[in-house]
Amino acid sequence: MAVLRLPFAARTFGAALVGRLSYGTVFLSLTLALTGATGSVGRTGAVVAVFALVIAGLAPVRARLIDRHGARRVLVPLSLAYAASLLALAVTTWRPGTPLWALEGVAVVAGATAPPLGPTMRTLWRAMCGQDRGLMHRAFSLDTVAEEVIGVSGPLL
């Protein structure tokens, strides 16, 4: 594990993995909670679609913010806002009959604040590995395998 012995690599990679854990669980969790709250698979699909479309649609905006202000200054507030908005979405699903517009509104905020931890971590790997192509290849491999394990095992947690 030479890549994890790089300065700050283990701590940075660990934090990124913890943050990315939500990506493996969020869609299943949202689907189950929203179906229970709305009683409708169609309404659930609408809210989950809004969430996913906002994540994808605003990805370039979040990337530009990171380029302009730096990862640390952008990712920390985004991560906190994302966690708070997911918590707010969970709270809005506790009581059946919550209006669809309220659920979609909170889903928009959650999607808008989803931090791009995967792409940012891959950029950091490139910076940490410098010109060592072999080390960079191992770092990217470790990152990819860890992300896949999270995607597969996340819903089990």
Image (tube, grey):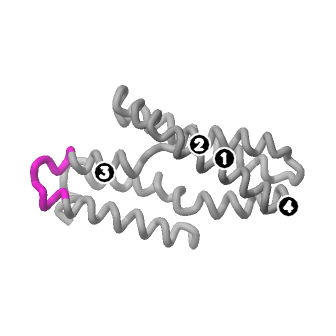
What residue range appears in magenta?
127-136
Question: How many residues crowd around disc 3 within 10 Å: few (fewer than 14), some, or many (20 or more)?
Answer: some
For the residues carrying marks 1 and 3, which lies nearer the camera in this image?
A: 1
Which residue is rendered at x = 79% and y = 40% of the image? 102
First in sequence: mark 4 vs mark 3: 4
First in sequence: mark 2 vs mark 4: 4
Residue lying farthest left? 131
The amino acid sitting under disc 1 is Val
The amino acid sitting under disc 3 is Arg
The residue indicated by pointer 1 is 50
Q: Position of residue 74 (x, y in %)?
A: 43, 33
* Cβ atoms under marks 1 and 4 closer than 8 Å: no
- Front residue (pair 49, 145): 49
Q: What is the secondary structure assignment of the residue under circle 4?
A: loop
Query: Main structural element of the magenta stretch: helix, strand or loop?
Result: helix
The residue indicated by pointer 2 is 54
* Cβ atoms under marks 1 and 2 closer than 8 Å: yes
For the residues carrying marks 2 and 4, which lies nearer the camera in this image?
A: 2
Residue lying farthest top? 68
